[in-house]
């Protein structure tokens, strides 16, 4: 789960509050909604409450999956049009690992209950500039098998209307247009599905389902951009055009660079020649949000052992290492293509 700062504010300090959960500070939402994020235990049935009318979609730049024609010609939706339906609003962004782990549940809910009166609307609010591109979002919609409408909230209009803070975030709206259930982050999928079933007049009997076990993850999300750069080794200083020497040892939950790199507010780009990235982490899986102006092959070792190479080109999340060994590891990534750009490390 990410509790996000709008990038332009450049404020907030990231901390790990639970396994695999990274948090930035942002202004508080409605206290009655915010209190739901403090729930403990593993409930199986929903606690439906009336939080008032759901805000209308605002500032949407593009709609996907609302017509059978092209992405650009997809017709806009309004909540007023959906009165009488049960509506699930899912805030997501396509390079977010937390969202990616949640999407199979959301898409299954839609496919299972659409004929019973459920409408799902994915509100895609971008974290990075490349996630504003309609083509990139349309590709992600196809890649993840999303068949429900998706709204591109590039300017955070709907995000702000809901005072939302998280990716992913679910807001469940009853047939009268009121928000009656919310969930932030991963887990408790059965609770959300039981809430959907209850609103559709079906029995709410599903057993607990918290998804992937992330208890072994002890590394936070790590950003390469200067706006939220916290995990670069102290011996290296970000520069718009710097040459870096890779240190032999890297502290836990830190990374270091070798070669010529350029830091921007959102990413770090290899300027020329060959570059390296070394990271010490505690997890079983490592992901990177990355892109490249030309295809870049990443040569990867973990604890000195060669791993399958990864080819980076499109702006998206890539899996660098996958295992069931949740312990301390050192990953080294060699990049031989200038124009390669790294945004974040995430873990699972």
Image: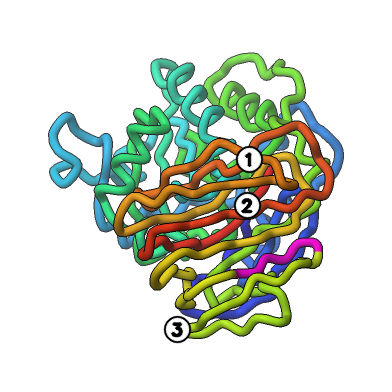
Badge 1 element: strand
Question: Closer to us: mark 3 or mark 1?
Answer: 1
Q: In this view, does 276 lie above or below 54?
A: below
Disc 3 residue crowd, few under 14, some 14–19, many 20+, Cα 10 Å: some
Q: Position of residue 116 (x, y in %)?
A: 44, 17
The mark nearer the N terminus, 2 or 1, is: 1
Q: Give how far across and how far down residue 151 sits, in percent.
A: 33, 48
Q: Nearer the viewer, residue 39 or 328?
A: 328
Q: Which of marks 2 and 3 is nearer the N terminus?
A: 3
Q: Name the residue under label 3.
A: 241
Given residues 315 and 59, the one toward you in this image is 315
Residue 201, located in which quarter of the rendered image?
A: top right
Give the residue drawn at x 13%, y 43%: 73
| Disc 2 residue crowd, few under 14, some 14–19, many 20+, Cα 10 Å | many
In the visual, does 268 lie left or right of 169?
A: left
Q: On the rendered structure, is 256 left or right of 68?
A: right
Q: Which mark is residue 346?
A: 2
Which element is circle 3 on? loop
Q: Is mark 2 on a helix, strand or loop?
A: strand
Q: Mark 1 points at which residue?
A: 306
Nearer-N-terminus badge (3/1) = 3
């Amino acid at each position: 789960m990410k509790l996000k700062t709008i990038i332009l504010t450049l404020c907030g300090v990231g901390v790990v509050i639970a396994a695999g959960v990274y948090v930035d500070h942002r202004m508080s939402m409605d206290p009655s909604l915010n209190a739901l994020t403090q729930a403990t235990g593993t409930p199986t049935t929903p606690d439906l409450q009336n939080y008032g009318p759901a805000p209308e979609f605002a500032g949407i730049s593009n709609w996907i999956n609302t017509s059978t024609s092209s992405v650009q010609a997809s017709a806009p939706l309004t909540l007023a049009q959906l009165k009488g339906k049960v509506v699930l609003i899912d805030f997501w962004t396509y390079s977010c690992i937390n969202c990616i782990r949640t999407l199979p549940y959301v898409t299954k809910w839609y496919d299972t209950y659409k004929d019973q009166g459920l409408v799902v609307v994915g509100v895609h609010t971008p974290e990075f500039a490349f996630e504003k591109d309609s083509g990139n979002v349309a590709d992600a919609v196809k890649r993840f098998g999303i068949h429900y409408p998706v709204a591109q909230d590039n300017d955070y209009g709907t995000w702000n209307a809901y005072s939302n803070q998280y990716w992913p975030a679910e807001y469940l709206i009853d047939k009268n247009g009121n928000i009656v259930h919310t969930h932030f982050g991963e887990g408790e999928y059965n609770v959300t599905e039981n809430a959907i079933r209850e609103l559709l007049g079906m029995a709410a009997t599903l057993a607990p389902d918290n998804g992937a076990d992330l208890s072994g993850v002890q590394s936070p999300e790590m950003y390469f951009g200067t706006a939220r750069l916290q995990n670069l080794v102290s011996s290296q200083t970000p520069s718009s055009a710097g040459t870096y020497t890779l240190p032999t040892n890297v502290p836990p939950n830190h990374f270091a660079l070798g070669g010529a790199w350029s830091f921007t507010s959102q990413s770090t780009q290899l300027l020329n020649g060959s570059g390296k990235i070394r990271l010490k982490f505690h997890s079983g899986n490592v992901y990177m949000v990355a892109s490249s102006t030309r295809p870049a092959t990443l040569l990867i070792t973990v604890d000195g052992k060669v791993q399958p190479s990864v080819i980076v080109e499109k702006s998206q999340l890539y899996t660098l290492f996958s295992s069931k060994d949740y312990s301390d590891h050192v990953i080294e990534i060699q990049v031989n293509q200038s124009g390669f750009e790294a945004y974040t490390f995430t873990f699972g």
